Amino acid sequence: MPPANDTTNYDETCPLLRTSNPHTTEAQIAEKPKPTPLPKGQLAALCVVRLVDPIAFTQVFPYVNEFMSDLHLTDDPSKIGFYSGLVESIFAISQLCSIYHWAKISDVIGRRPVIFLGIIGLTMSTLMFGLSKSLASVLLVRCLGGLFSGNIAVIHSVLGEITDSTNQMVALPIYGLTWPLGSIIGPLIGGTFSHPASKYPKILGYQFLKNYPYFLPCFIASVIAIIGVFLGFLFLEETLPSKRICKKSGSSTASTNGECAIIAPALPDKPFGVSKLLSIPIISALALSGFTLSYLATSFDVVFVLFCYSPIESGGLAFSASQIGYSLATAGAIAAAIQLCIMSYLLRTFESAKLYNFCMALWPYTFLVLPILNLIARAGSDETTGELGTATIAFLWVGIAFVLMLTKVASLAYSISMILTKENAPNAASLGQSNGIVQFAMCFARSFAPFLVSSLFAISVEYNLLGGYLWVAIMVTVSFLGTTMSRKIEQHSAKTIG
């Protein structure tokens, strides 16, 4: 960051971290900067804390349609998706209302208290979800969960504050593993432990679990969250520059490599307001494209579960909750492999903005593959029993693995968006709010995407629009529009560099 007595005017064309000074020689410029030592302890603690959210969020997916069916809200199976989409939308709407406020509060009181308060609230709401017996109670607890999950932008800001441009290519793939890892564990918990009394009567045949068949997966997710809070409290340090305390001297400090460096008395950077941040072209482009990315990714997650749950004759695959859980766990394993094996290479090899644009261009094809899977199921099902042959099942799982691989490569855009936001934030004090704006846009899309896409799926099937595949045509169209929006990021990024 520029020194306090530097009177130069800084705008959106100035990088967040200055890489040289006016007295730097040509030899020093040509020399490759030495990577800053990665704060491994801080990164590990942050990953543990981050793991809580995807586990609590995704453990619902395998059984949410079955849950809505058990509430006897409708006699028409094709309309179950309407209610499951409503459950997901209310979560995102609540998150939308809180995300920017959490980010702004964390810029004042610090990152740690906001993160821990959010996780504790998410833990309690997850536990109450398993005890819900009506649609009203389900919507209420999901609303509370969404409000407390608004701290995601704060967690992203912590990652930005413990890394810099020399080590983020190593840190980001490690941090990026938390969501796919959580999306492996969560669906496995949800698919394995829903209706435990009927699945495991000798071990878990308790009357309480018969009355509340979805309590056990929520309880397990809550226990993991409590462990995450405990470990985070012990090991996660405050990263907000104005709140850091040097353990050696007890003074406020600034550091990127873990060493204590006492800050000289100076005026801190002032955070930009929302209107000023949005006037920066690259920030507004990131928010707009983030909106599209979140809409597409959320829509796919919702429609994929609904597609797997629906009968074959209704355009689905007729999977059980356990099979849906396994498919979602497969998706998480694929995402983890991508993050671990190729993410770091991609970040080192390709420019972030171009890589982001490539990921966005994959979304149309993810939706196009789904109806092909249904056609395979239709062709391979027995006319008498409706059961699928061994070869058909094998083809289906290969197809599922392929489409999930496409979605996980496309979803790398989330991680790249974090890098682009950090690189283009006008100053360190505005990093939290910059992340808040981008995450707000993403949550806004997530607030109505589940309801919209599930309703579109139901209408397409019920009225046999385009053979029941109208939802595919619309999502592919939206995906192509999303690629045009992502190009603006590359354009503005090129202008900034120039």
Image (tube, helix red, strand yellow):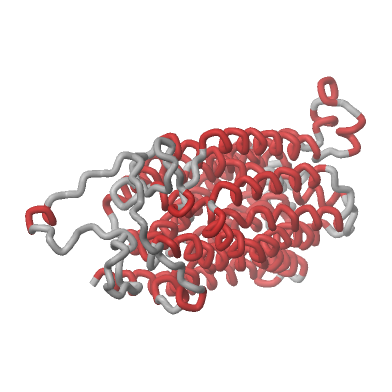
Please state the horizontal and vertical placement of residue 81, each as a whole percent of the image: 75, 59
Q: Is residue 369 visible?
A: no
Question: Residue drawn 87% across and 26% down?
Answer: 205
Question: Residue drawn 53% across and 73% down?
Answer: 477
Horizontal relation, residue 145 to residue 359: left or right: right
Q: Quadrant of the C terminus?
A: bottom left
Horizontal relation, residue 331 to residue 218: left or right: left
Residue 322: which quarter of the image?
top right
Please state the horizontal and vertical placement of residue 51, each as a whole percent of the image: 57, 41
Q: Is residue 473 visible?
A: yes
Horizontal relation, residue 218 to residue 257: left or right: right
Q: Quadrant of the N terminus?
A: bottom left
Question: Residue drawn 75% across and 58% down?
Answer: 143
Horizontal relation, residue 439 to residue 130: left or right: left
Q: Tell which of 118 and 351 is nearer to you.
A: 118
Please state the horizontal and vertical placement of residue 63, each as a whole percent of the image: 75, 45
Please state the horizontal and vertical placement of residue 200, each as a whole percent of the image: 80, 26
Residue 198: which quarter of the image?
top right
Question: Residue drawn 74% across and 40% down?
Answer: 218
Q: Total label count? A: 0
